[in-house]
Image: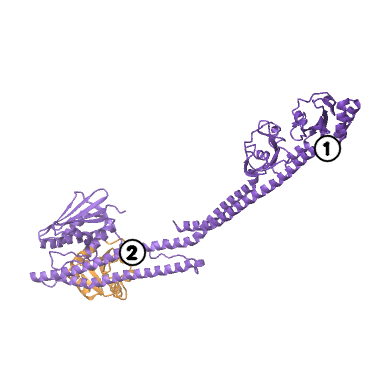
Amino acid sequence: MALILIVEDHPDLQQIYSIAAKDAGHKILLAKDGTEALKQAAENTPDLILLDILMPKVNGAEFLESYDLKKHPQTKVIVFSNMDSPVLEHQMADLGVNLYLVKAEYTPKELMGIIDGALKSTPPAA
Amino acid sequence: MSIVQKIILWFLGLILVPTLLVGGILFLGFNHYMIDEAVGNLSHQADVQQQRVEAVVNQNTVQLSGFTSRILLPTTLDRYNHTHTAGDLALLSSTIDAAKSQTPKYQDISILSLDGKVIVSTMPSAVGQDYSTKKYFAKAKVKNDTTDYLFMDDKGELNINLVGPIMYQSSPVGIIVIDASAADLMSIITDYSGLGNTGETELAKYGANGGVMYLAPLRFDKTATLQPGADHMGTDSPVMRAIDGQAATLLHAMNYQHKPVIAITRPIKGTNWGIAVETERAEVYQPLYNLRDTLVLLIFVVLVFGVFIALYAARLITDPIITLSIAAKAVSTGDLSQRVDHGSNNDNNEFGVLAHTFNTMASHLEKLDKMKTEFILLTSHQLRTPASAVKGFLSLLLDGYAKPLSAKQRELLLSAYEENEQQLRLVNQILSISQAESDQMVLSRSETDLGKLAEEIVDQLKPIALEHRQTIAVRTSPESPKAMVDQEKMRMVLENLVSNAIKYSPDKGEITISIKQDADTSVIKVRDQGYGVGPDEIDQLFKKFSRLPNPNSVTAQGSGLGLYLVKMLVELHAGTIEVESKPGRGTTFVIKLPNKQE
């Protein structure tokens, strides 16, 4: 069981990932934009953040810049977006994200499988 | 021909044509002037020399006649012939002594009897000698001769015998023989003033053998003097024409040295002599040759300067063109950030305006390109998001998150799921094509096990094939064929081809993916036992939005983008794709990929 912060502005998608995550036995935190996500991440310490990019107010990239993954080595981040761009993928990699997935290509079940794999992987050296 | 070459040629033409024209006119004009000058000068010299020689001849004749016609000489001689008195002999002697002393050029004077005996002479040793054998003797009895008997004396001086009869009452009573110096004649002939370095006057008559005999030394052959028939000057030498009585101007003659000369010929009145005043053409033309050399040098200098100036002028024009061309080429290959530096000096000229326009155009293109990229990205995002939600909900239902499904419910939901997947594939294809077409697609190559990739795709698509009881097999060589490819792009290629094979094969059809590899190339074949296509349709296969009728389906499936995208992706890997197909006999797609990145 892990604490997963789902950052997603689309309510339907937020609902789908919540259902799947809960069903997989995880606890979830929800945020509909980067500002909320920063607040949630500060108040709790999520094991994994499922991060959308294109969001109102503070977007995914801005969230990562503020959150700073180096300061949170225990937290895994999976970027989960329908923006399929090599440029964005590079930008995310520069910000320390190793997993960049296109939402449309995965079923909720497949996503949970990936989340489980990510949670089991060794955290990067701080 | 490049612009630079054209400008240089035009420029050289502009410089050379007038230079050559002016030079040519100058050369020809100067040529005529030189010839006219030379001929004029030589003619003048010839006239002067002719007059001078004629004056000497005339003087000799007049003096001889004057001397023999004095009343004292014939009367005394006639009386002596009859009386032989010592008084008359002394009188004759004193007469010739007086004549000799009065006329400095006279060396000796002798009076001969009609039979050739020397009666009296200023040279005492000659008295009593018989001169009847002298060559002038026969002629001297008849008439005066002041031209025929030139000779060289012991001292090498030119002399002449002036001979003639002494007449008394119309009958000859004796013969006068004067040995006179011909120094006056010689000084005329050897006077080269006004004749340059090669000019001279030749004085000659015919020798005994019919050849030319020079009567005075030649400027460049002193030994030829009085050599009878020293005929080393050809049969048509200028001097021969003079002897023949011609007053001619010869522009192209040869002299006794066999050198080309310009010559003026003049006969000497009252004699069988002629003179040729000539000068070598080389000397006449020397100033012309100097002018020619100067002109050639001038043309060479003009050419060299012309090339440099033309090159400079050409580069003034072409350098900006080249700069612009390099930038335009870069833009044409996708580097829209290229700008042309037109420098402040060029701001107001044509290039400055052009460069500014080019930069503005490139900026617009760059802006449009960015807008296009963002548009595609956002559009695909917007299209995918609801489809992702549909996919998510349907997946949750199918995975039993809500409650177990009946078989019918499951079938219906699966159909909805598949349709949604089809839409997502279409969005992916459009996005990929847009990226590839705008050169934004970057291959992320890694060493990929092609066999494993094929197996994964088979696993993924097997459920659909099974619905039609089709089989899919992968055949590879025992060692796993590996190639440096973009795994995701190659997955897209094989997915498209295998899913097409499924779509266009009848039930129970066999689909085979075979992979072979040599040192450089991997060959992937996707073969089906489908309906195949005719030769006319093969060309249509890879065209955008081209869809062939599918006997399996009433409405054609697919977007018509799959094979177009497949071809783009294969070519992006520097590979090729070909189709082998016949109607009713299945279709084989053959992909050839380089194993390594080029």
Q: Which residue is label 1 attached to?
A: B66
Q: Which residue is drawn at 36% across and 62% down?
A: B333
Q: Where is residue B296 in the image (x, y as percent from the top left)?
A: 58, 50
Q: Where is residue B173 in the image (x, y as percent from the top left)?
A: 83, 30
> Mark 1 Cα within 10 Å, few/some/many (few <14, many 20+)?
few
* Chain ID, purple in image: B
User: Mark 1 — on which chain does it sit?
Assistant: B
Q: Position of residue A83 (x, y in %)?
A: 28, 69
Q: Nearer the viewer, residue B16 or A32?
A: B16
Quadrant position of residue B568? bottom left
Q: Which residue is label 2 attached to?
A: A94
Q: Nearer the viewer, residue B32 or B116?
A: B116
Quadrant position of residue B446? bottom left
- The outermost residue toward the left is B407
Q: Do labels 1 and 2 share a chain?
A: no
Amino acid type, callout 2: Asp
Q: Residue B215 carries which label?
A: none
User: Mark 2 — on which chain does it sit?
Assistant: A
Q: Quadrant of the N terminus of chain B?
A: bottom left
Of tags 1 and 2, the one toward the viewer is 1
Marks 1 and 2, how far apart at CA: 138 Å
Colour setting: by chain
